Image: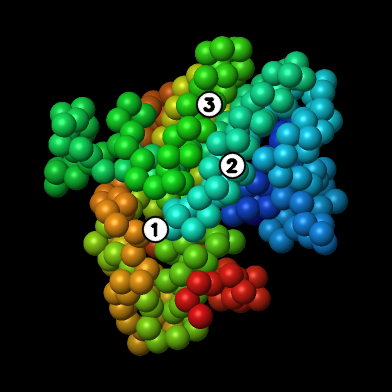
Amino acid sequence: MDNLGVVDGDALRTVAGKTCLVTGADGFMGSHLTEALVDAGANVHAFVRATSSGAVNNIGHLRDRITVHEGDVTDMHAVRSALAALRGTKPVVFHLAAQAHVGESWTRPFETAAVNFLGTLNLLQAIVDLGLEIRAFDTAGTSEEYGNIPEAVRDQHRFDEHGRPLFHEWSPLNPKSIYATSKVAADFLTINYFDAYGLPTMVTRMFNNYGPRQNPRYVTGTVISQALEREEVRLGNLDTMRDFCYCEDGVRGHLTVALQGRPGEVYCYGQGENIRIGDWAGLILRIGEERGFWTGRRIVADESRLRPGSSDVVALRVGYEKLHQETGWKPLWTWEEGLAKTIEWYAANRERWIPRVDWR
């Protein structure tokens, strides 16, 4: 994995030889994190959703270098069994298992709530019940927790030179989807267990990771997958703005928070810049065309792809000063570099994503 050249050296030295548990290890960010931990010399335990075939898609190439625990975070028995196997190792727990698609949280509301809230509660309570000593517990939060700014609390926010909001760890939360609300609850649970039991827990609030292996139903993947397959790229709201951060910088974010952050704290990471979705799609199409992956693609607004009602979030951009000041973390990948890598992966792995698209 390319990221080992850019992961913070202090974080890598700290994790070498240590036991780490990654929930959601076969997912997008979970697989990149798992790969980085293995390459750094950690003893990695991967908690993945159980399937009848026992298949893993994104970490199959690591199967002989990790310990795989199959189960579901909503199943307390499976969670306890995985954690019990870590007694005496003082593990670092990276909790990335989630139903993480905003749009699908409206069509799968109960699953979203169960996985994101109950799953987090199961992990934390099992650690307490087992008396398991841990080095750190890192919960993956999301920028979606901030939502839109109500006029009544506008004075509690920071804004950039264009008058757009700049979110940080102390910004008020205003979740606008079932997904975002469930993640707010998971974040607060994580800190609750620090306050009540002294567990070394922390939250890493992510701003729009993208990269290879991401589900093609997310905006970057849907633009790339559509452009590879057809002339029209159909999207929902083209005017919302997002802060996109390449997955390898995200891996560095999680490692840095878990291994260098302060327990009981929330940390945000992201690119620190945002862009209109329409312009982001245009950037993807330009980079892909320049590299010969497609030609003559066009963007079409499709109302059927809009979020329901007034639940969309207008603009997200991170202020990551806290993480930078305490640890030195900052994004190292430019959008152009990250998108080029992402397009290359999609072009080379059609069989991995084509069954999962939502536009056919």
Which residue is drawn at the image coordinates 79% and 47% (left, top)?
70
Disc 3 packing (10 Å; few <14; some 14–19; many ≥20):
some
Which residue is drawn at the image coordinates 55% and 47% (left, top)?
110
Depicted 129 relative to depicted 224: above or below: above
- Please tell me whether mark 2 sits on a helix, a strand or a loop: helix
- The three-letter amino acid code for the residue at tag 2 is Ala
Of the two numbered discs 2 and 3 in the rendering, the one whose residue sits closer to the viewer: 2
Marks 2 and 1, the one that precedes in the sequence: 2
48 to the left or right of 242: right
Marks 1 and 3, the one that precedes in the sequence: 3
Place of residue 19 in the rendered image (x, y in percent of width and height, measured from the top left): 75, 31
Asked if residue 267 shows in the view, the reply is yes
Residue tagged by mark 2?
114
Depicted 193 relative to depicted 25: above or below: above
Residue tagged by mark 3?
189
Disc 1 packing (10 Å; few <14; some 14–19; many ≥20):
some
- The three-letter amino acid code for the residue at tag 1 is Trp
317 to the left or right of 192: left
- The three-letter amino acid code for the residue at tag 3 is Leu
Question: Contact, CB < 8 Å: mark 2 with mark 3?
Answer: no
Quadrant for residue 286, please give it: bottom left
Quadrant for residue 60, please give it: bottom right
Q: CA distance from mark 2 to mark 1?
A: 34 Å
Residue tagged by mark 1?
335
- Please tell me whether mark 1 sits on a helix, a strand or a loop: helix
Which residue is drawn at the image coordinates 82% and 27% (left, top)?
84
Q: Compare residues 203 and 344 and report the one nearer the observer.
A: 203
Q: CA distance from mark 2 to mark 3?
A: 14 Å
Disc 2 packing (10 Å; few <14; some 14–19; many ≥20):
some
Marks 2 and 3, the one that precedes in the sequence: 2
Q: CA distance from mark 1 to mark 3?
A: 33 Å
Depicted 306 relative to depicted 91: above or below: below
